[in-house]
């Protein structure tokens, strides 16, 4: 891994973050097609906002272990028009740590990893058995 996609504070990623090993994770995306800005942190999207979390986690990308965990977010008005992408995170993707609610992970993206090339849209839960 060469570096980080976004500038990170010292002691970030957190010391107990782990390299992914080809596992599939799920993420909400904004439009009809998956694009790079679907994988930006809240800090990159809102550079001056005050978040109720550490700066390190504000600079991570939320990923979910299960389709159903991500799909629950679609019930919220803020997310109802979004879609779900399935992303395969390989060891060069960066570092990942389980944080917050069950199945939620904070992902610190490597600048060498292209999430768009490793993602596909997921239409419904039936695609996941």
Image (cartoon, helix red, strand yellow):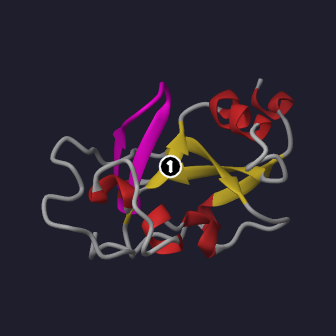
The quadrant the N terminus occupies is: bottom left
Secondary structure of the residue carrying tag 1 is: strand
Q: How many marks?
A: 1
Q: Which residues are magenta?
A: 92-107
Closest to the observer, 43 or 108: 43
- The location of residue 125, given as percent across then percent down, is 81, 30
Is residue 60 within the magenta segment?
Answer: no
Closest to the observer, 87 or 51: 51
Residue located 45% across and 69% down the image: 113
**Image: 15 above or below 5:** above
Residue position marked by numbered label 1 in the rendering: 62
Closest to the observer, 122 or 56: 56
Residue located 41% across and 60% down the image: 93
Residue located 44% across and 41% down the image: 105
Is residue 94 within the magenta segment?
Answer: yes
**Image: 29 above or below 79:** below
The quadrant the C terminus occupies is: top right
- In the image: residue 18, left or right of residue 75: left
Closest to the observer, 119 or 40: 40
Residue located 28% across and 44% down the image: 18
Bin the neighbour count of mark 1 within 10 Å (Cα to Cα): few under 14, some 14-19, many 20 and up.
many
**Image: 105 above or below 48:** above
- The location of residue 62, given as percent across then percent down, is 50, 49
């Amino acid at each position: 891994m060469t570096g980080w996609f976004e500038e990170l504070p010292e002691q970030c990623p957190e010391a107990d973050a782990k390299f992914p090993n080809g596992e599939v994770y799920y993420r909400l995306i904004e439009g009809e097609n998956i694009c790079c800005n679907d994988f930006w942190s809240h800090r990159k999207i809102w550079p001056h906002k005050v978040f109720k979390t550490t700066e390190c986690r504000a600079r991570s990308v939320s990923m979910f272990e299960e389709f159903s965990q991500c799909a629950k977010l679609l019930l919220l008005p803020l997310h109802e028009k979004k879609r779900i992408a399935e992303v395969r995170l390989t060891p060069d993707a960066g570092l990942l740590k389980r944080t917050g609610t069950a199945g939620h992970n904070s992902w610190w993206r490597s600048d060498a990893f292209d999430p768009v090339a490793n993602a596909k849209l997921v239409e419904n839960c039936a695609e996941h058995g």
